[in-house]
Structures are given as structure tokens and as C-alpha cells.
Amino acid sequence: MLDIRIDPTAFDCPDVRIPLVWTVRHKVDAPVLDDVPGAVHAALGRLWSDPRLKPGASVAVGVGSRGIDNLTTVVRTAVAALQEKGLKPFIVPAMGSHGGATAEGQEQILRDYGITLENVGAPVRATMAVEQVGTLEDGYPVFFDKNALAADAVIVINRIKHHTDFTGDIESGLCKMCAIGLGKQHGAARIHRFGAQGLRHIMPKVGRRLTETTNIVGGIGLIENPYGRTAGVHGLTAREIGRQPEMALLKRARALAPRLAFDSVDVLVVDEMGKNISGSGMDTHVIGRVEMPSVPETEWDGPTVRVVCVLDVTDVSHGNAAGLGLADMTTRRLVEKVDFKVTSTNHRTSGEGGVRRGRIPVVLDDAEMCVRSAIGSCGRGIEKEVRLVRIRNTEFVELLEVSEALMDEVRSREDLEIVQDAHLPDLSMPLGANH
């Protein structure tokens, strides 16, 4: 355990009080898919004509390391559909360097998400070994998971969404899972070595090349609404991954992505961060900061936030606090949960994405001290003028707690509904636990 000796008076502002807050619900367009299994069958229906999906063929199903709504249902349904066709599916972790860049760590992550033989009907075969399967036109090497390569066919399952490091025509989704997820640490580290430009330009080329030269037959792309619920399930053939059909799905996903309800915030309190929430622990589009050396903050979308304080890391992150440096203040509880070996492996593999995000914020003894210190450090000399917002995490931003300074705006907006009148926030449990 890291020995952190803190002088409680160094940053604490004992004369600053925790303000009264109002609980508010942000009402936005949030379509929900009613029949997820049916949509999975329809998505796979676009792939059945591929001659590699013949009875008796082995099929590697790539599954990643994000907290995706209905993931177990989607994987279980896909596995059953493949088996009904006489195919032999198995699961491969498609998550780059996550899980401490070990096969055992990646199996554990899938287990935490319910992806086990007992739950989905197919075994998990994990390895960090890769083979070089070709090059790009300029000689850049392309790598692929050995277990996936040994199968007769590969189908990837992933959520399509904006990325927290860069913007481009192809961001997080099926193409990235092929290039980085199934490239394992070796392939992921090479791409990340080029920073945001590598993700923007090299990653899509690698993904497309893999769909042309390996046994990838297609994928199932999931889209979620702003509340983290499944909004769409789409099947893409190999030749559609990383190309116009996936680009169109990314545009749809961007339109439905979670956004903070306010453009200007003095103190943003985030109850929990984690790898199941975002690759960077906290969605950079929600907190309005990217912290990438090659990406100007002025070019990044999202709100203007003066001070971000994060109070905890999710248990399913297994101590991976990659992205903690996006916050300004945090708690002893969070830091003592950090597995610094796992976290540093993630930061090292992500290259430019880990340079600033690997820093440790100001550490305070507890959540109350953290919030008080943030209020006292945000630059507002008059406490009642502090625009404070509290969210559970950056994936679920429907429910918020806001301070008095924001209430005139809340009352003037039709998309904001007051759920609970003025009260003291309970920082001992995540926001929404009682709703």
C-alpha cells in the first residue's frame, strides 16, 4: 500500500461549509431499445452469408473491458445464435493492455462483467500473445491476437462512442477493438506511441487492414443513450468496419452521448471514476478537459470546469485508476485503492494519454474535506456564488446535485426538473443510491 502522509491543514478549508444542494434531473432525448435479443439476431443476420461461418467452424467473439449495458445479454444471445448455426464460438478478451496486461487479469475483467462459460455458454480463451499479420503501405506492422487468429472466423462486440483522447471519423467502436483491443498490449502500445495522431490516423488504417487480411467477418456495434441504456444494436460486415457505416453510427452515438447539464461549473464533484465508466476513468467530454500534450484544451468540447474532485474508484476497476490526473483533488480512500502497477501499465501503453493523466491530484483525508477544499480553491470568494455540481460518474449524468448559485438557471429551463429541495449532500454514498 502506498504510504501517503497528509497534513490535513495543508489544503483543507475548515471555515468553508458544505453548501445546501438541490437534486435535479436532466431530461434529454433517450431512446431505449426494447428487444435487445431480437436486435442481436437481426445484426447477426447481416453476417450469415459469409462463407467462413459454416457449420463446425470455430468463431472467436471479441469482448472488451467497458461497462456496457446489456453486455451479458448481447454476448449470450450471440453465442446461442452461433451455436444454433452449428458453429463453435469462444470468447477472447479484446482489451489491449487492460487487466495489467496479463491474460489472467483480462479474464478477471470479463468475469466481473458476467462473461463466463456459465453465463454466456462459451469458454473464455485469453492470451497476450500476438502475431504480425502484415503491414500498412508504409511498412507499419499490424498485430493480431493469436487465439483469434487461430479461429476460422472472428466477430467483435463493442459499444460505438466518442473517444476521450481525440476526435475523428472513427473513434471508439468496432474498428478500434480490432486494431487495439485484439492488437493486445503490443499493438496498442505501438499505436499509442504516436499519441492522438496515431489514434486518429493509424488506428483506423490498422483496423481496416485487419478486416481485409484476417478472419474477421464482422461485428455487433452497440449504441447507448445519455443514461447509459442500450439504444441500438447494429451488425456490420468486415468491409463496413472502420468505413462509412461505422462513421454514421458514431455520429448517432455522439448525438446521444452524456453531457453535463451546465456550460460553466466552478466545482464538479464526481463520486466515482473507473475503467468500466470510461477508458480515461472519467469521460473528458463530460468534464470538459482532455489533458493530452498534442490536443489544445481550447479545441476540446464540453463545459468549463474550474476544479474537479473525484471521491472514489469503482471496485470492478481492480485498482486501475488510469485518468486520475484529470482531477484536481481526490480522497485518501481512492488513492489507497489504486494498484499502481496496473495503472502505470495502462498509462505507459496509452503513451501520450498517460503523460498528464498519470499525475496524482491533491489528496485529502475524506470526501467532505475534498469538497470543502475544492470550494475554497475554485476562485469564488463568496461561497453562495460557487456553482457546484455533483454527479455519480461521467456515464450517468441524469441525476445531479447543484448549489444555490445554479438554481435560477435550473428553474428557467424546461429540461431540468427539481427532484428534491434544499438539503445537505450525503457524501458517504454515491449519488442516486436513494433514488
Image (cartoon, rainbow, N blue to C red):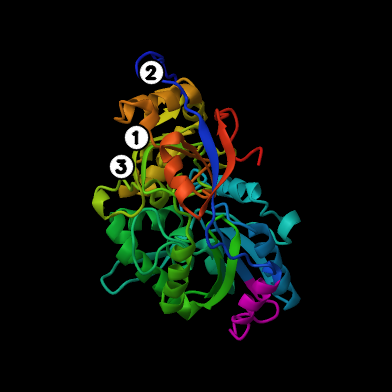
Q: In the rendered view of the protein, which quadrant contains the C terminus?
A: top right
Element type at mark 2 = loop
Q: What's drawn in magenta, residue-wise?
A: 38-58
Q: Tell which of 273 and 124 is nearer to you.
A: 273
Q: Residue under label 3, please give it.
A: 355
Task: Judge whether 294 appears above or below 15 on screen.
Answer: below
The answer to whether 147 appears left or right of 330 in the picture is right
Element type at mark 3 = helix
Residue at point 35%, 24% (across, down): 376
Q: Residue under label 2, please give it.
A: 13
The answer to whether 402 appears left or right of 418 in the picture is left
Location of residue 412 in the rendering, given as x and y in whole percent from the top left corner: 45, 50
Location of residue 350 in the rendering, given as x and y in whole percent from the top left corner: 37, 49
Q: Amino acid at mark 1?
A: Arg
Q: Earlier in the sequence, mark 3 or mark 2?
A: 2
**Alpha carbon of mark 1 to alpha carbon of mark 3: how far?**
8 Å
**Alpha carbon of mark 2 to alpha carbon of mark 1: how far?**
23 Å
**CA neighbours of label 3 inside 10 A, class few (<14), some (14 to 19), many (20+):** some
Residue at point 41%, 25% (across, down): 363
- Please state which of the two labelled residues, at mark 3 or mark 2, is closer to the viewer: 2
Q: Residue under label 1, please give it.
A: 359
Q: Tell which of 138 and 397 is nearer to you.
A: 397
Q: Is residue 46 magenta?
A: yes
Q: Earlier in the sequence, mark 2 or mark 1?
A: 2
Residue at point 65%, 49% (across, down): 111
Point out which mark residue 26 bears: none
